[in-house]
Image: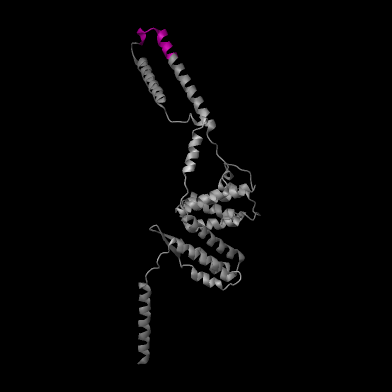
Amino acid sequence: MRRPRLILLILVVCRWGFCAAQDAPPAAPLSLAQYIEALDDSHRIAQKLKDDPSTGVDLLQALPESSWRVRDDGKDFYIPTASLRHDVEDWQKKNSDALRERIRAQLDALRSDARDYQRPPSDVRPRHVLLDSILARREFKGVHGPTWLDRLKQRLMELLFRWLGRAFASSAIPTISDVLVYGVMVLAVLGVAYWMYRSIRESANLETIMPQPLAVSTKQWPIWLREARAAGARGDWREAVHLAYWSGISFLEAQGTWHADTARTPREYLRLLPASSEQQPALRALTNKLEIVWYGMGEAGPEAFQQTLVELERLGCPCN
C-alpha cells in the first residue's frame, strides 16, 4: 500500500514543479547601464580563464541562455549569446588560446558597442558649415538647376521647331521667295548648332570639377569601423556588415598589401592575397559574410556583425 502512495506523491510533486516552471514570469529587461555592468562582469570572469579554467562554468552562468534583453527609451533590444556560449563550451573541452581570445574579443566588442550607443549623437552642424563653404567656391558657382533663361531658351526652341514643321507642311511656301525660306532655315540650323555647342562645352567644364572615384584607403579604416558601429547602434545590421568589410579592405590597403584600385570587386581583393598568407582565411570569411548579407540579401543581425568584427580582429585590424 505504501508503494503506490509514494509513486502518487512523486507524480504530484513533479506535476507541481512543471506547472510552477510554466508559470514563472519572464526575466525582467535590463537597462543599458545594467547591461554594460553585466558585460563588465562577464569580461572580468573571461580574464581569469587562462589562470583558472574552472571559471568557464561561472562564465556560462553569467551569460543568458539565449540573449540579453535590454530596454532603452521604451524599446527592447535582444543581444544573442549563442555564439559566446558555444565558444565557452568549446573552450571547456579544448582550452584553446585562440578560443579564449575570441571570447574576450566578442565581449570587448559588445562593451564598445554598448558604450557607443550611450554617447549622444554627434553635432553635424560644423560639417554643414564646411560643405556650404566648399559649395560657395568659385568653381562651383556654375553648378545649378535650370534657370529662367534656360527654360526660356527651351521654350523658344520648341516654338522654332513647331514653326518650321508648319512651314514645311504649308502650301504657301511656293509663293515665298526661295532665298528667304532657305536663309531662315540656315540661320535656324546654325542657331541650334551654336546653342548645342555651348551646352556641350558647359557640361564638359562641369564634369572636370566633379570628384572622381576615390580609393578605399582614402577613408582611413578607423572611420569605416566607426561608421559600421554607428549603423549597428541604429539597428541597420546589413549596412554595419558592409562598412565593417570595407574597414578591413582599407586596413590592408593602408599596409601596402596591394596598390589602390577603385574598380576591384570583393572577390578580386580576395584573389590578391596568396593562399599562404595568414590573413587569407579571415578575408575569405569577411568576403563570404559580405556576399551573403549585402549582395545575397541574407538576414543580418547583431550576431552577423559580431562575427564580422571577430574576423577583422583575425585580420589584424584592432576593433577595440
Q: Locate the C terminus by quadrant.
A: bottom right
Residue lying at 59% horizontally and 69% vertically, measured from the top left = 94
- Residue 58 visible, this orientation: yes
Count how many numbered circles sit on residues in the image: 0
Query: How would you classify the magenta stretch by its main secondary structure?
Result: helix
Of all residues, the one furthest to the left in this rendering is 171
Where does the image place residue 221, in percent across and percent down from the top left? 57, 49
Is residue 184 on the magenta stretch?
A: yes
Q: Is residue 246 above or below residue 2?
A: above
Read off the magenta span. 173-186
Q: How is the image coloured?
A: one colour
Q: Nearer the viewer, residue 270 or 222?
A: 222
Where does the image place residue 159, in percent across and percent down from the top left? 37, 20
Where does the image place residue 283, in percent across and percent down from the top left? 58, 53
Q: Nearer the viewer, residue 76 or 168?
A: 76
Q: Is residue 159 above or below residue 115?
A: above
Q: Locate the N terminus by quadrant.
A: bottom left
Residue lying at 53% horizontally and 72% vertically, measured from the top left = 57
Residue lying at 52% horizontally and 30% vertically, measured from the top left = 139
Is residue 44 on the magenta stretch?
A: no
